[in-house]
Image (spheres, helix red, strand yellow):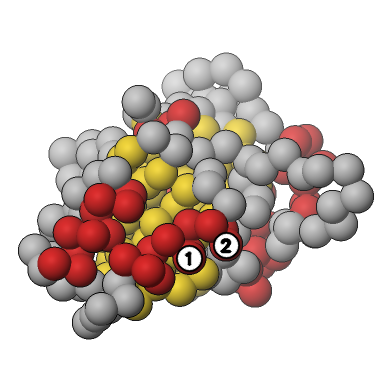
Amino acid sequence: MAESAVLESVNLEPGDRRVSPAAHLAEQFAAAEVTGPRGVGLREVPFQTMVGVRTVPGSEVAGRVEAQLGTALPASCGSVSVAEGTAVLWLSPDEFLVVSDTDPATLTSALVEAVAEGPGSATDLSANRTTFELTGPSARGVLEKGCPLDLHPRAFAVGSAYVTALWSVPIILWQTGAESYRVLPRSSFADFLGRRLLDAMAEFRAPELT
């Protein structure tokens, strides 16, 4: 399954009053979309299930976690493991972020049980971050204005995810396709980062000078 298709926004049930961290910017995101060869689009993908897992790779606990997730834990910096509806991002040698379309309480409970005999931990972090998705030919150009990483394909391959910064905001940056990225900031930075991304997209509305 393509990583860009793994995770989509959650459809809220009638009466659900949750408000995502960047909901107030949704109309501005839509209005800022640029089409054509210099195109770039921005949207928030709200309410993703995110569970932080600490375990030692290769241990019995890690094996139980992998059995629960249906995929091996990623083995190196930047790597991501993908199963049906779930992705596991490498954060450090013994720290991983599970991003899923599964109910957060259900997934967290299953992972807590998997690490129960320790050492290890599983913590629901779903409210800790939101997700921005940048797509289009100019998505990389927008990110290069504020990210210190080398985003050229020779250094940042599709399917990679790294802990980095964007305009000094700590983020996880995940490239899900050739022209698509997911940016995971802390929820408290959503307004600031959303507005910075909008500003960085503006130049691509103008025709490219030749």
Q: Which of 9 and 177 is in front in this view?
A: 9
- Quarter of the rendering occupied by the N terminus: top left
Q: As drawn, is 59 to the left or to the right of 169?
A: left
Q: Nearer the viewer, residue 116 or 5?
A: 116
Q: As drawn, is 26 to the left or to the right of 70?
A: right
Q: What residue type is labelled 2?
A: Ala
Residue 108: percent from the left, percent from the top? 48, 64
Q: Which amino acid does label 1 sit on?
A: Ser
Q: Which residue lies furthest to the right in this view?
A: 15
The residue positioned 22% from the left and 82% from the top of the image is 119
**Residue 191 visible (yes or no):** yes
Residue 155: percent from the left, percent from the top? 18, 46
Tell me which corner region of the image, top left, top right, bottom left or bottom right, holds residue 52. Answer: bottom left
Query: Label 2: how many residues lie within 10 Å, few (<14), some (14-19) or many (20+)?
Result: few
Q: Mark 1 points at which residue?
A: 109
In the drawing, what numbered circle is on residue 40?
A: none
Q: In this view, does 25 lie above or below 83?
A: below
Residue 207: percent from the left, percent from the top? 59, 24
- Quarter of the rendering occupied by the C terminus: top left
Query: Label 1: how many residues lie within 10 Å, few (<14), some (14-19) or many (20+)?
Result: few
The residue positioned 48% from the left and 57% from the top of the image is 107
Q: Residue furthest top?
A: 36
Give how far apart the Cα atoms at labels 2 and 1 are: 6 Å
The residue positioned 57% from the left and 17% from the top of the image is 36
Q: Which of 86 and 27 is in front in this view?
A: 86
**Labelled pair 2, 1 in contact (Cβ < 8 Å):** yes
**Residue 140 visible (yes or no):** no
In the drawing, what numbered circle is on residue 105?
A: 2
Q: Is mark 1 on a helix, strand or loop?
A: helix
Residue 154: percent from the left, percent from the top? 16, 39
